[in-house]
Amino acid sequence: MTYSNKLNATKEAYPFEKWSTYFPGMDVYTTENCNRAKSIFDTLIRQLAAMGETAPRAEKEEQFKSAVLALNDLNEATDGGLIETGEREELCELLDMITIAAGLNPEDYADGEGIADEWREW
């Protein structure tokens, strides 16, 4: 499987569509908010793929940092209500999957907690 295919395969684990169906009637899980979260991950994957497998580790890490900071902003814009415990676990797991697909080891970050824990506020 190519590098780009590995990255794109992680999209199978996207939780965003189910969020709006799991939490019907909750204003925070609007299609717009779920699509904004999805877009953050689409951008991360697209940028990592464009860099290529041999891109320096630091450059890949910058893409993850940008994505996590964007998620922080999105969560803050929803008064901290979009990313609760369950969503946090799903997002951290997804970021770990993308980390592995990008050729990095999640255990190398935040004392083994994963790359999201380097910058996340949720």
Image (cartoon, rainbow, N blue to C red):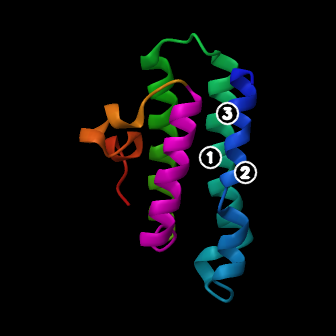
Q: Secondary structure at mark 2?
A: helix
Residue type (three-letter) at the residue carrying disc 3: Leu
Please give the name of the residue rendered at 63% of the width and 45% of the height, measured from the top-left corner.
41
- Residue picked out by circle 2: 12
Residue at 35% x, 56% y is 121
Quarter assignment of residue 32: bottom right
Q: Which residue is mark 1?
A: 40
- What element does badge 1 sit on? helix
| In this view, 21 is above or below 43 | below
Whichever of callouts 3 and 1 sits on the residue coming sooner in the sequence is 3
**Left or right: 111 as drawn, with respect to 52:** left
Q: Picture coordinates of residue 43 (x, y %)?
A: 66, 38
Residue indicated by mark 3: 7
Q: Please, what secondary structure does the residue beneath circle 3 have?
A: helix
Q: Is residue 122 visible?
A: yes
Q: Residue at x 48, y 67 (%)?
A: 83
The answer to which of 84 and 13 lies nearer the viewer is 13
Q: Which residues are the magenta region?
A: 80-102
